[in-house]
Amino acid sequence: MKKLIAQITLLCGFWIQAQEPTFKVSKIVDNGTAENRVNFVILGDGYTKSEIPTFIKNAKSIANFMHQYPPYSNYASYINIYAVEVISNESGTDEINKGVQKDTYLNSGFFHEMDRLLTTDSGKCTATAARHVPEFDQIIVLVNTPRYGGSGGAISVSYNGGASANMNIHEVGHSFANLADEYTYGQENVPIKYEPHQRNVTIETNRNKIKWNKWIDDSTPIPTLSGQGYDNFVGLFEGGLYRPKVVYRPQHDCMMNSMSSNFCKICKEAHINKFHQIVNIIDTHTPQFGQLPITDSINFYVKPVAPS
C-alpha cells in the first residue's frame, strides 16, 4: 500500500517537479526496507553547499537523540531516518521582523507575530521529500539558524541551535502523533466550545467519558491537583491547549508541556499506536500467501519487528 501511495504521489507531482534539482540522500538510520518501517525524512533549509557537512552533523544529532528518547528508543527497530542534503543559495532563514530575507530552497522563516514560530513552504517540503524518499511517513525540516523557533503542523520544523533536539521531539509530537500543546499560555482568554480532537487534551470532567479514562486509577481524584502525590499518575490536571482553565491534560508534566520532560503515558501511547498503524509487526514469513504446499509436513516461519 505504501508503495502504491508513493507511486501516485510521484506521478501526480512529476510534471511540476521535472525541473527541480535532485539532492543527495543519506540513510542515517537503517532498520529495514522502507516498505515496512516508519520513515522519517530530515530536510535542511538555509544550508549552502559548503555547509552540508554541518547539516549532516545536525541531522545525525537529531537521529541519535530520537533513538535515546522513549518511546522512540523502545521502537527503534521500527524506524528509518533519511537525510536529504537540500542546498540553498544563501545561509540562514528569513526574519521578517528584522528585515532579513534569505534565498533558501524551502522558503523557511520567522514570518509571524509569535517570535518563535518558524515555518516553511509545506508544499515544497512535501514535494522534495516525495521526490527523494517516496515512502516517507514524516518530514522534519531542520533550519540553519541559531534563533530559537519551530512549528509542528503536518511538517515538523525546528531550528538547529542548542535545544533543537528537544524542540524537534516536541514538534514531531504534533506532526506525527497528532498531539496538542499542553502549556497554559498564549490563548488565556479565548473560550473553547468543543472537545479537542487531539488525544492528550480534553474539556471533559466526567471520569467515564475522559479519553484516557482506562489509564486513571479509581483512587485518583478528578480533577487532579498537582503536588498532591499524583504527579506521576494519569489523572485530569487542569491547564492545556494554551489555557490555564477549562482544558485538562493527562499528567502533571509532559514533553508537550515543557521540553525538558519526557512524554506522558498518554502521549507515548499515541506514538505507539501510530507506529503500529504504519508497521506490520510480521516483517517476513514463509510460506508466502498462495504458496501453501500440499505435503505431510509444513514448516512455518515468522520474523517479527520487535520493540525492545
Image (tube, rainbow, N blue to C red):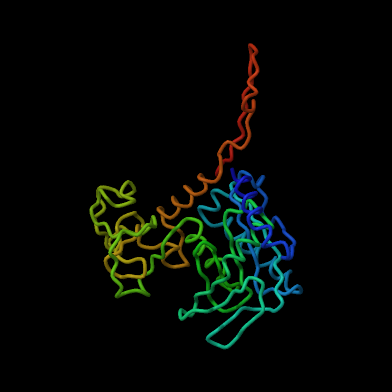
* Towards the viewer: 32 or 2: 2
The residue sitting at the bottom extreme is 99
- Looking at the figure, which quarter contains the N terminus? top right
Q: Residue at x 27, y 59 (%)?
A: 224
The residue sitting at the right extreme is 50
Q: From this viewpoint, is residue 308 visible? A: no
* Towards the viewer: 90 or 284: 90
Please give the count of numbered marks on the rendered protein.
0
Q: From this viewpoint, is residue 291 visible? A: yes
Against 77, is 175 above or below?
Answer: below
Relative to 233, 5 lies left or right: right
Q: Residue at x 41, y 53 (%)?
A: 265
Quadrant of the image occupied by residue 164: bottom right
The residue sitting at the top extreme is 296
Q: Residue at x 25, y 59 (%)?
A: 223
Q: Position of residue 113 (x, y in %)?
A: 46, 81
Q: Position of residue 7 (x, y in %)?
A: 65, 49
- Looking at the figure, which quarter contains the C terminus? top right
Quadrant of the image occupied by residue 240: bottom left
Against 115, is 84 above or below?
Answer: above
Q: Position of residue 118 (x, y in %)?
A: 53, 74
Against 68, is 296 above or below?
Answer: above
* Towards the viewer: 302 or 235: 302
Q: Position of residue 197 (x, y in %)?
A: 37, 57
